[in-house]
Amino acid sequence: MLKLSQLALATLLGATTSQANASDIDDMQTQLKQLQQQMQQLQQKLDAAEQKATQQQQEIDQQIAKQQKAAEQQTAAVESKKEPQGIKIGGAVRTNYSHTSYDEDSQDRGGDYDFDIFRLNFSGDVGDVMLNAEIRFFDYMTAVKYAYAAYDFADDWQVQAGITKVPFGNWPYNSHNYFFGTTYYIGLEDDHDMGVLFKRKIADNWQLDLGFFKNDEQGGVDGSVDNRSDRYSYDVVGFRSADEGVYGDPGARDENGDLVGNPIGEYNTFSGRYGYHFEHDGGKTEVGFSALAGGLHDGVDRAGDYNAWALHLNSNIGAWNLQLQHGEYDYDIDNVNRMAVGAYSFYDSIAAQATMTNANIAYSVPVEWGPVTGLQFYNDYGIIYDKSDNTEDTWMNVTGVSIAAGGLFTYIDYVFAKNQPFVGGSVAGDSDETERRFNINVGYYF
């Protein structure tokens, strides 16, 4: 606050009175006194106004602090009373019709219509821990697809522990159709094992998944299960000798209880998947690289090692989706060039080493046809070649359409394939015949 100096006024007055007549001096002194009194009164008023403003600001600050404290207390009370979400239950029932070129009895009947699966899904959270599980019931087996607990331990990171998905290749699937791609039947698509997975959510355009899997979902080579092929996803369960067939149980025993096969199991597997996302005109594309490596155990000692790698691309351009993937796998056991795999209560064989390539394309169309809301037309092609067992290539081409209609989801597929499981062959088959399968799978999801 500025104040007028009385000394400055007096000096000014002195300068003025030196030039004035003596008769005016008294009047000027009187005016000076009046002016000084007015200035003092004005200063007092200004000081009082400033003091009042300071008090009002203090009162406002105190009120704001009280309101902030009340809001914090209310938020804390709400959080303390927050109930966990709990676990939600969903699932699906699916049926399947097929007409094939390799089953004459089925052809005579005009194809077969069978029950496929009944499944239950569990998802939700208890506190800050998320839970997810899926169990599938078939006519011939029951299998857990995944079952894990998850926790977001940082803004961009989540950890999952239990039977969780092995990060490898195009995500979540390297295919569009009901039969998946050729990579599924060698254990490199939609595989789930027992371990820990660290997932970095998409941020700064990149995503990273790192996993350590102690063994497969059945506990490895000596897991406490009756049938090592009663599982959803493919895993190596043994190796084949040169004179052994393609479909035998590698853990079979003779009448004396002695092994007649060569059971093994995956263990201590590290897997990593990196994907870079970028946006462009019409959509988004991910390019990535995956790799895994682990050991093979025969129940007594380490029998060998295995590894795989893949380059992959998944691109959405308007209504189009393009998937490309190329890689190799290698099961390294001395003097072994054929492995046994198991899934769907069925044993099959694959080459111990091979190269794999996939090229898939799809086109999605939103529609309003009664309950039908979406169609996706696709053509998926995959091939496994340069096999260590010197057998013919395995390839599969699936042309089809998927139909979304409320809770119903239907695949209509026409399959051409050679040496392909579920299409009249085996990955270790050596046939020159091309087989065909027309398939309709209808599922109700709830």
Image (cartoon, grey):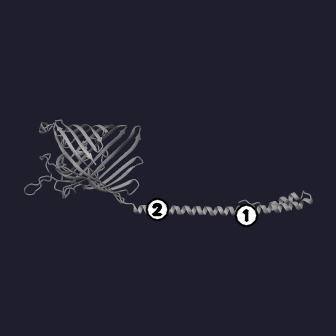
Mark carried by residue 152: none
Residue 235: x, y in percent?
A: 22, 50
Residue located 86% across and 60% down the image: 28
**Depth order, front residue of 413/97:** 97
- Callout 1 secondary element: helix
Residue 75: x, y in percent?
A: 45, 61
Q: Quadrant of residue 177?
A: top left
What's under tag 1, amino acid-wise?
Gln
Earlier-in-chain disc, 2 versus 1: 1
Question: Dividing the image into 4 quarters, which one contains the N terminus?
Answer: bottom right
Residue 7: x, y in percent?
A: 80, 62
**Depth order, front residue of 126/245:** 126
- Callout 2 secondary element: helix
Residue receiving disc 1: 44
Residue located 36% across and 46% down the image: 275
What's under tag 2, amino acid-wise?
Gln
Q: Is residue 336 above or below residue 70?
A: above
Q: Residues within 10 Å of mark 2 (few under 14, many from 20)?
A: few
Mark carried by residue 74: 2
3D distance between C-alphas at marks 2 and 1 = 45 Å
